[in-house]
Amino acid sequence: MRKILAVIKREYLQIVKTKGFIIGTILGPVLMSLFLIVPILMSVVSVAEQENIGVIDASGKLFAELDKKMEQKLKDGSRRYLLEEYRVTGDISRLKEALNEKVLAKELSAYLFLPADISEGGEVEYVSEHVSDFDKTNNIRNALNSIIIGKRLKAEGLDPNKVGQLMSRINLSTKKVSKRGVEEDTGGTFIISYFLVLVLYMTLIFYGQAIMRGVIEEKSSRVVEIVLSSIRPFQLMAGKIIGIGAVGLTQYTIWGLFGIGFTTYGGALIADVFPATSSFNMPSIPAYIFIYFVIFFILGYFLFSTLFAAIGSMVNTEKEAQQFMTPVIMMLVIPLLLIIFIMRSPNSSISVILSMIPFFTPTLMLLRVCILLPPFIQVGGSIVLMALTTLLMIWLTAKIYRVGLLMYGKRPRIREIIKWMRYK
Amino acid sequence: MNALELDKVTKNFGDFCAVKDLSFNVLKGSVYGLLGPNGAGKTTTIRMVMNIIIPDKGTINFLGRKMDEEMKKRIGYLPEDRGLYPKMKIGELLLFFSELKGLKGAEARSRIDHWLGRFDLADWKLKKAEELSKGMQQKVQFIATVIHQPELIILDEPFAGLDPVNTKLLKDIMLEMKDKGVTIIFSTHRMEQVEMICDNICLINKGEKVLEGNLNRIKKEYGKNTIVLDYEGEAKYIKDFAEIENIDDYGRFMEVKLKKGGDPQDLLQYLTGKIRINKFEVKEPTLNAIFIAKVGEQNEKNSGGN
Ligand SMILES: Nc1ncnc2c1ncn2[C@@H]1O[C@H](COP(=O)(O)OP(=O)(O)O)[C@@H](O)[C@H]1O
Ligand SMILES: [Mg+2]
């Protein structure tokens, strides 16, 4: 046991001491919180300035009303849009040309052309140097819509306010029922499950490959046989997998602490600094989901890391490893492609079966646990199935590993690998 | 008392038989040479001894016991395929290898310093392994082999890649360890090294034992019928002599082995007047000559049998 400990210690320190790990572990959460915070801030701290907008009102009756509707205010209380009417005197196209000049000279930020037949479906033109300010175009569209529709209703003898009331849309509020009762859920589940599944997928691949690279390095540097004179191949493999797994857990712990801190204090902090965001709700992860996440990470980690270790032992270079890695990576990628399907029908029998396949369980069962807590028999069953598969894989891969470690030279064929498994 | 006993050990890789019915014993406290040409099966044999590959048949015992974890602590092994973790510092590396052998930190550190001094590597303790030359790395690997003061050390081609100075240093250290009672087994295909330090040898070829025993006795048994000739003239006269079994011709210098019962004096008389003889010495055969003769003999036998 002390020997395995020595291997665990070496593997752990070898990675934790690298700059890559330190930067990745600290930069990860910082980047993640930036992704969360920046859009919120952007939406609040808009950088709007007062704008001059020219209006050619060919109908001659709309400008006053439009001017009244476009009353959005800036922070300092002044009007956001200053509308200026250009009367049609003579040739419209010459007037438009003159306004084009003004836009280019930045005297106007944009101008509108309201055709005479606007009520009958005539097209309104919006001309600007750039047309990607959706906030502004939305304001204009809404104002004109309400004016024109109001006019049409009046023409038919209807009261626009009354119609507005009658046409008000119903609100659909989505709630989630589970054993713990009914809770409101506005898409948070979706984001959290997707996020957790992605994190699981990425760390399984990342640490699996770290193990594979470690094994290849031991082989290519020819240090492995010296190590094997002290410990058995199985102990070496176990020490390696546990050591690198501990690195993963360290990273999760740091991220987890950061995440808890962020969800508990982050919202308040943001609200403090930017009062306008006080309505923002921090997504939070229920404890039971987190526990399942750790369980599935550990099981998935053992299952896939043994495969990666075996691949490393079979080859001499990372390039040679590609061919063997493809099927393993596929087993991690396929569940990702199934995420949307499972989310739509988490309880269909196909979803249940898929999530019970040991190689898919970590991602798909976790997903189902996030969406709805499946019956215990399914979750427990999948865990047992996975544990058994993992033990079987460890037994098989340890044999490959033992023979492969001392095989230098040609990349083995599948037939040879099967033969290795039969070696005494 | 035997430190190591192999009994009818066989290893096949698929259809290929790498080691066949190999038996030999290594006396405790002796230096034992495992000889054979490339591909003879030396490394395979040593790996089976170290329990790294498992024999198909036969048994291997240490001091009357099977190899186990406890036993591994009493053995030091320098493999033929050897290397170091390239990114680790020499000090850390040796500490790691010591911990694998169950050594405690403080004790390990003082031994590491002692050995690094002995091998003139003290200044390299904080350097990464990849910064060391091959020869230096090999010395570090040797330290890793003996750091836990094993009773038995097994070295696979220990001199390969060392310069003459370091070869001598390593040889001296091996003999020093022998004086302290350590049993040493090493493999090589270089005969002069064996003659310098071995008590007993086992010569294998194509996985089979060809010759085994005490080095001095083997030489005696092989007979005092080897003649070293320093001559001028045509070599064909010598080759025509009927009683010759084997000739090792180096141009002006020749090692001749006579058939059993052949008398060197007959050869001397036969040659007189035919060529100029500067030196005519009757001596024990070199191991090299025995090696070449025995291996040649076996290869002939095998191809004849097919
Ligand atoms: N793992 C293996 N699989 C197949 N053949 C092997 C393996 N290891 C060694 N051999 C073969 O066994 C023979 C003996 O090899 P080895 O023991 O390394 O010889 P030596 O050390 O005496 O040079 C060689 O022909 C080698 O190709
Ligand atoms: Mg060899």
Image (cartoon, helix red, strand yellow):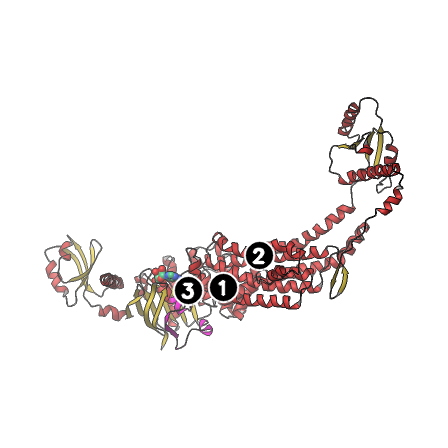
Residue A99 position within the rendered picture, expressed as x and y whole percent measured from the top left: 79, 27
Numbered disc 2: secondary structure = helix
Residue for badge 2: A332
Amino acid at the residue labelled 3: Leu
Q: Image point 77% across, 46% down: which residue?
A: A43
Asked where in the image residue B202 lies, by quadrant, the reply is: bottom left
Dots 3 and 1 on the same chain: no
Horizontal and vertical percent for residue B194?
Answer: 32, 65
SS type, badge 1 = helix
Q: Which residue is mark 1?
A: A397
Q: Residues within 10 Å of mark 1 (few under 14, many from 20)?
A: many
Disc 3 from disc 1: Cα separation: 26 Å
Q: Residues within 10 Å of mark 3 (few under 14, many from 20)?
A: many
Q: For the residue with label 3, is its CB less than 8 Å from the closest atom of ligand 2?
A: no
Any part of residue B118 in sight:
no
Expressed as whole percent of the image width and height from the top left, the position of residue A2 reads 53, 70
Give whichever of A14, A352 is nearer the camera: A352
- Labels 3, 1: front one: 1
The CA distance from mark 2 to mark 3 is 41 Å
Q: Badge 3 is on which residue? A: B78
Left or right of residue A64: residue B71: left
Kindly identify which chain the residue marked by label 1 belongs to. A
